[in-house]
Amino acid sequence: MSTDLQSPSPRPGILDIAAYVPGKEHAPGVAKVYKLSSNETPMGASPRAIEAFQKAAGKLEIYPDGQALELREAIASVYGLNIANLMCGNGSDELLGLLCHVYLAPGDEAIITEHGFLVYKIQIMGAGATPVTVKEDDCQVTVDAILAAVTPKTKMVFLANPGNPTGTYVPVDEVRRLQAGLPKNVILVLDAAYAEYVRRNDYEAGLELVSSNPNVVMTRTFSKIHGLAALRIGWMYAPLAIIDALNRVRGPFNMNAPAIAAGAAAIRDQSFAAAAAEHNLLWLGKVTGALTSLGLRVTPSVTNFVLIHFPDVDGKRAPEADEFLTSRGFILRAVRGYGLPNALRMTIGSVEANEGVIAALTEFMGQP
Ligand SMILES: *Cc1c(COP(=O)(O)O)cnc(C)c1O
């Protein structure tokens, strides 16, 4: 790009970034819409979180606590962590961005995986660094592929575990092998946005890995199982040196007061989260089973969504299925941007939503 002295120009590389496109929300002309495109919970938020949010509305003229102490204390007590190792962010998206801006510079490389969360690439490029994409094996991240991509320029590795939009996970032994194989100056970012949904003995979100290594961080969110996506709350468990570095550049009041109050109440309401996980587990199984018996291939998921692969047959591909479902009010997520042009991602929703999608896809697949 030429340097133009007549108008402001962003840093090199910024205009190469493709902005994030959120899940669709509307189905024009359809009376009842089921939004299953952003992995939001059908259970809503805990009544205690809503009450705390409403209470916070009475003192909106007061700046929030810049340390988000109430929220960090709640997280620390629920998970048995040292509060000094916790940082909260305006969504985990903010924390991922801070990590990139603090630890990446032009010339550095950061590794992401083939179908990895698009926010990583945006933040890596936003920091002027170079994303290096490694192949997945049929929607499964393999540690060997990541290790093979490490160069002297590598500074960060992003692993969504479980992955979005795949729904698959990397077992803890493999995550340990990945950490052990990385140079000590490379940060391993474990994005465990869906950890609360996973029911597998060989899965760990990363608490132990962070506790025992100076180059591992784990990010979590209140947007999924806790049903607080609108408030933008994420948290990170990280070594003190990394917390210290990020604290120097984050916005001094990056967490708003209603979010701090509602988040603290939500995470203390573990029975609400447990009920949400139970609903999900039941319907994850039912939806996977029903769609598989229609002849659709569903990637085995441990999360609150499923990746549905459509036949490579005229009239039966993902774009046609998307159109068919949207016309009936079911909004799923097209994942072309994730390198999956013939698949749709469906969030596990309410009983009515799940049964509706199953019925609609039964009709779609049965059409001549
Ligand atoms: C939903 C999601 C998040 C959460 O982002 P927030 O900014 O906390 O809402 C993070 N990572 C992945 C992979 C996700 O799917």
Image: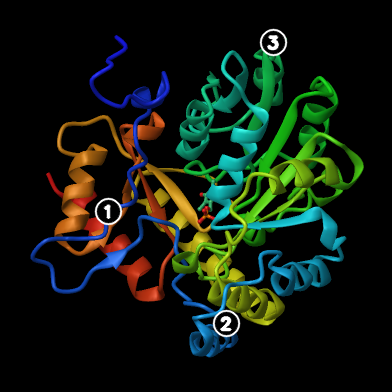
* Amino acid tagged 2: Ala
Q: Nearer the viewer, mark 1 or mark 2?
A: 2
Q: Is residue 115 left or right of residue 221?
A: left
Name the residue nearer the viewer: 6 or 340.
6
Are dots 3 and 1 in contact, CB under 8 Å?
A: no
Name the residue nearer the viewer: 27 or 366.
27
Are dots 1 and 2 in contact, CB under 8 Å?
A: no
In the rendered image, the vertical position of residue 8 relative to residue 149, given as above or below = below
Horizontal and vertical percent for residue 257? 57, 74
Q: Residue at x 29, y 67 (%)?
A: 34
Mark 3: C-beta under 8 Å from nearest atom of ligand 1: no
Q: Which mark is residue 24?
A: 1
Question: What crowding class fits label 1: few (fewer than 14 Cα within 10 Å), some (14-19), or many (20 or more)?
Answer: some
* Amino acid tagged 1: Lys
Q: Which mark is residue 49?
A: 2
* Amino acid tagged 3: Thr
For label 3, the residue is 151
In the rendered image, the vertical position of residue 309 relative to residue 109, given as above or below = below
Question: What crowding class fits label 3: few (fewer than 14 Cα within 10 Å), some (14-19), or many (20 or more)?
Answer: some
